[in-house]
Image: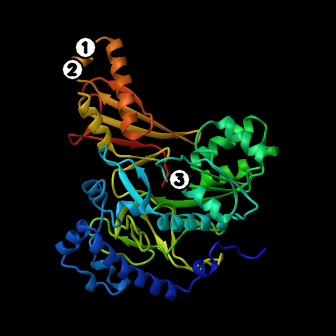
């Protein structure tokens, strides 16, 4: 069987043509944000740059970086580049202190995002004869809507399952003959175990899985592939840039092709901001070339990775990024949800607790565990157990409201969290993901 692409003329475009296309789009995009986003214009003026200084991708380094701090400061409409009446959708992810990241889309933006997801499905062997089983969350989270739209573009029968209700997932999988599974890797591993426990492996028709939204190791990939009898493909994206489909894995499974007709990727030194040469590890930075409503220029993802342009056996010419190899900030991804220690601190202070706490994350049976130890004040420590238990319950609810996922909260004795050089160790991540 020949190689399959959703948009062959774009996915196999010669590198020089890609760069010409990127340069033309960049010039246009810089003018678009300068004319329509006062917040951007101020940032550019602050570094002495105008649209006339940008002639192509060789001038990209002149533009200022955009960070999550900017998104928080400009929330909700400060970075909007189109009138609200031209926007048809928002998607959202949790912000660092309760202010969410809200991304806007025109219909054109949605079409291009779905094209990117369609490319990922075809790269995983998808055709219109497939049944695509989408078990990413729907709603504000980008996972479900992105793969759902991509599946429609390919012409697959699409099962918009969303997450959870494992019995129903497996019933539909067997009854409707799902062939491509889209979800987080930890949920794929859980589904694999549940299918084995029920003795239903011979009734499952899956051939491929597209798994993202959290870090996973190659060992976990092989385990899922073996248990489900599939090939497991990685997908990468972030709400700020569009959602899943910014980059995706092909049959070679040696990194993810970035959709360079829509995004320029750079790797920078996270401390100095200096652009690093290809092949060096650093922080991934994205520029949106074709987004209309919410175009970000030089957005710092805080993900650490490596880019390479070695020719790929699949025939795609777009640059590849490695799996993320860590973060340059303190964000954790737990069960596919972004969690910042500062969010936890905000909840503790708002509920009258001390800001002395420790987050302990682990992965057991391929699922993330999330525990938070919180030091009690001396007064609370002398209270009875019923009062302490009630406070734990209150914190669990308040944290779920802020983070969107449930943590186990343990109130511990004053001064019992180890300090090192006077500062508490805030995060213990035992998952060995990178």
Query: Residue 256 appears at what percent x and percent y?
Result: 55, 67
Going from N to C along the chain, the mark reached first, 1 or 3, is: 3
Query: For mark 3, does the 10 Å Cα neighbourhood hold few (<14), some (14 to 19), or many (20 or more) residues?
Result: many
Residue 388 location, quadrant: top left
Name the mark on residue 378.
2
Name the foreground residue: 345 vs 376.
345
**Residue 143 makes an appearance in the image:** yes
Residue picked out by circle 3: 143
x, y percent for residue 236: 51, 61
Pair 3/2: label in front: 3
C-alpha separation, residue under disc 1 versus residue under disc 3: 46 Å
Q: Nearer the viewer, residue 294 or 13?
A: 294
Looking at the rendered structure, the secondary structure element under dot 2 is: helix
The disc at residue 382 is 1
Query: Could you tell me how far apart the alpha carbons at marks 1 and 2 are, in whole angstroms?
Result: 7 Å
Q: Secondary structure at mark 1?
A: loop
Q: Is residue 234 above or below residue 396?
A: below
In the picture provided, is 191 more to the left or to the right than 376?
right
Q: Is residue 295 above or below residue 8?
A: above
Which residue is nearer to you in this view: 350 or 230?
Answer: 350
């Amino acid at each position: 069987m020949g190689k399959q692409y959703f948009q062959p003329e774009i996915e196999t475009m010669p590198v020089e043509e890609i760069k010409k296309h990127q340069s033309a789009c960049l010039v246009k995009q810089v003018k678009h944000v300068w004319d329509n986003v006062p917040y951007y214009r101020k940032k550019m003026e602050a570094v002495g740059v105008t649209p006339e200084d940008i002639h192509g991708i060789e001038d990209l380094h002149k533009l200022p970086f955009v960070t999550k701090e900017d998104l928080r400061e400009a929330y909700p409409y400060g970075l909007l580049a189109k009138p609200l009446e031209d926007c048809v959708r928002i998607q959202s992810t949790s912000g660092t202190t309760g202010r969410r990241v809200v991304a806007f889309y025109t219909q054109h933006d949605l079409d291009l995002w779905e094209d990117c997801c369609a490319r990922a499905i075809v790269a995983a062997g998808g055709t219109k004869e497939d049944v695509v089983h989408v078990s990413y969350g729907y709603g504000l989270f980008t996972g479900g809507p992105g793969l759902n739209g991509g599946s429609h573009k390919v012409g697959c029968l699409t099962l918009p399952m969303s997450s959870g209700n494992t019995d129903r997932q497996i019933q539909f999988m067997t009854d409707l003959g799902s062939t491509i599974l889209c979800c987080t890797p930890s949920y794929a591993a859980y589904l694999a175990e549940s299918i084995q426990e029920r003795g239903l492996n011979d009734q499952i028709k899956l051939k491929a899985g597209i798994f993202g939204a959290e870090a996973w190791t190659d060992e976990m990939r092989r385990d899922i592939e073996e248990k489900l009898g599939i090939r497991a493909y990685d997908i990468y994206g972030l709400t700020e840039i569009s959602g899943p489909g910014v980059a995706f894995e092909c049959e070679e499974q040696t990194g993810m092709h970035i959709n360079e007709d829509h995004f320029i990727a750079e790797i920078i030194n996270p401390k100095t901001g200096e652009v690093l040469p290809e092949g060096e590890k650093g922080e991934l930075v994205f520029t949106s070339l074709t987004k209309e409503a919410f175009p970000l220029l030089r957005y710092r993802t805080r993900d650490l990775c490596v880019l390479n342009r070695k020719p790929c056996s699949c025939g795609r010419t777009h640059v590849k990024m490695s799996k993320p190899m860590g973060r340059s900030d303190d964000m954790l991804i737990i069960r596919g949800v972004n969690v910042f220690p500062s969010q936890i601190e905000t909840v503790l202070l708002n509920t009258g607790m001390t800001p002395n706490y420790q987050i302990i994350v682990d992965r057991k049976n391929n699922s993330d565990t999330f525990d938070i130890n919180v030091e009690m004040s001396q007064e609370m420590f002398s209270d009875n157990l019923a009062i302490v238990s009630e406070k734990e319950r209150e914190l669990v609810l308040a944290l779920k409201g802020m983070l969107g996922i449930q943590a186990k909260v343990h109130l511990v004795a004053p001064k019992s969290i180890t300090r090192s050089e006077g500062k508490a160790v805030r995060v213990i991540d035992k998952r060995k993901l990178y």
